[in-house]
Image (tube, coloured by chain):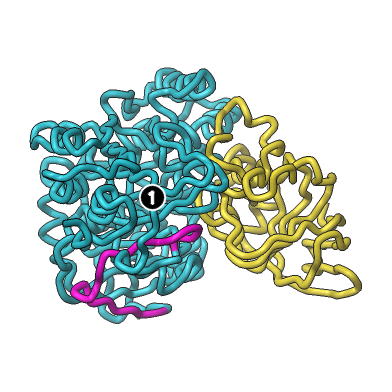
Chain colours: A cyan, B yellow
Amino acid sequence: MGRTIAEKVLSDRSGSDARAGDIVKAEVDYVMVNDVTGPIAFREFSKLGTDRIMRDRIVLVPDHYVPAKDVASAEQAREMREFARRYDIANYYEVGRSGVCHQLMVEEGFAAPGRLIVGADSHSCTYGGLNAFSTGIGSTEAAAVFATGRMWFRVPESIRIALSGRLKEHVGGKDLILRIIGDIGTEGASYRSMEFCGDAASLSVSDRLSVCNMAVEAGAKAAVFPCDSLTESYMKGRARGDWRPVSPDPDASYADELEYSLSDLVPYVACPSSPANCMPAAECGAAIDQAYLGSCTNGRIEDMREAASILKGRRVHPDVRMIVAPASKEVYGMMADEGLIRVFLDAGAYVSGPTCGACLGGHMGVLASGEAAVSSTNRNFLGRMGHRDSKVYLAGPAVVAASAVAGRIVPPEGVA
Amino acid sequence: MTVYRGTVRRFGDDVDTDMIIPAERLLAENLGHLGDFVFEKCRPGFADTVGKGDILVAGRNFGCGSSREHAPMALMQAGFSCVIAESFARIFYRNSLNIGLPVIECRLDAADGETAEADTEAGRVSVGGREYSFDGYTGFIAELVEAGGLMNLVREGRF
């Protein structure tokens, strides 16, 4: 019997014949922690009382509460900085040279085809957009990887998702994943790996990263795209070290098979308070107070270009504030070079540097009671972006921009 | 200890980690008293009502969302002795095993305020005279639980 991508990567890294349902111990290529999950990992590691540490495999990215919003978050950020110094960890990304952790992992070439990567952040499944097998773990688990370079995995069953057709204008990876989660539900892929196949040519690397990023909202352990020419050209000059694409065997066994025609997709929103609460944006119409563009899901240059193309020559609705937070310094720089910051400023939007802040209701765009936001982020749980009586509608960059102009949730063609 | 006896605190499906403890509490300075904030957004004042040993009973997909280990830590610090749910989200499940919060996958017909008793070794739960059984931990997971979490295995050179 052939093997899925999950089975191949985990077999390779565990030196065993890893099959769905098995539990294996596998060598990981990289482990990432951020400023929220890091402190627990640092304390657990320190308790071991050893200086033996897998320093070259560790990536430390402060992103959730930086630039520090108060003294407590400043102390927390310092804990990471000091851990990096104490253990001589080169892959520490300071404010101003950094960004949202998952975007950094991709831009800095840690994520690459065929790799096994873990992160103490649930959206660590993002790197499957580049044909890596990656998944979220806990902080204590991250500390174990610091010490051993290994992690245990239950080899997941896989769901094969066959793609065909081509995306229409203003429809992106976010719309595909919102539709999938809407169809299968918040635990429709629990403990499983989503394995995409078929014609993904119209999905950019950025789109694929958005899709894989939100796989966890359906409970998935991982989501993986095939490696193609788009992947290869993205990796050029970026990847650290060697990499080898991984593809499934033709006779691999799948727990389920789904098919999506990309041509049939429209711009969607996930209404409060579940990422599975999916409807076409054209049917929503909800009034909004805030439009947020950013995050590991949709804070890349392609997202900024998409939103700017809609905002150019238009104004954000008088009753709406729009906040734009690129996912990294690299994206921020490209926005400057391409004149996109000017487009957002002229439209009446606020443009900040990279941070996770508002996505998790932390800072830089928290919602008051009764307020509603359309957001390019990944979660719309109760109170996620602020007060318990605030609401979040998840959407792609085109819907966020169009809704910012209209003052209510509309698809891109809804703005004159 | 393998037997947990306590008052049922009932929750539904899709209890996410933001509900268990919101992101604005995830600061290192709170690590010693995360229990104070448990369910503060969906059930304000709830933390004050949790008695030592209470048993959290929920539906499907308990602990979905973020990887924050603060979620099972908050439940333990609040006083919960174990969580029984029809199904768990995977990272929450892993985190709980590592910090010693027993997580039991079992569908229960139990109401708020009833007394439940769970025996993780025998794989049995009883509540209001009703008996339920569940599969105990096996293989590596049993080893992990027995050791009291992954770091103990690392410390002993067994991982």
Using residue B44 as the reference point, say whether residue A55 is left or right of it.
Answer: left
Q: Position of residue A61 (x, y in %)?
A: 37, 32
- Type of amino acid at the residue the image marks with label 1: Ile
Q: Point out residue B82 in the picture as x, y percentages from the top left corner.
A: 75, 54
From the top left corner, tell me how far across and down residue A406 is, in percent: 27, 52
* Quarter residue A43 falls in: top right
Residue located 38% across and 50% down the image = A288
Secondary structure at numbered mark 1? loop
Question: Farthest residue in the front direction?
Answer: A318
Judging by the rendered image, the residue that carries numbered circle 1 is A288
Quarter residue B111 falls in = bottom right
Nearest to the observer: residue A65 or residue A198:
A65
Question: How many numbered tags mark residues here?
Answer: 1
Q: Quadrant of the C terminus of chain A?
A: bottom left
The quadrant of the image that shows the N terminus of chain A is bottom left
Q: Is residue B113 magenta?
A: no
Asked where in the image residue A62 lies, by quadrant, the reply is top left
Q: Nearer the viewer, residue A225 or B142?
A: A225
Residue plotted at (61% across, 43% down): B21
Q: Position of residue B19 (x, y in %)?
A: 60, 49
In the rendered view, would you say A2 is above or below A113? below
Q: Is residue A373 above or below residue B107?
A: above
Q: In the image, A43: left or right of A325?
A: right
Q: Is residue A184 above or below residue A99?
A: below
| Range drawn in magenta | A256-275
At a point 70% along the width and 69% down the height, the residue shown is B106
- Up/down of B68 relative to A408, above or below: above
Residue occupying image coordinates x 16% and y 41% = A238
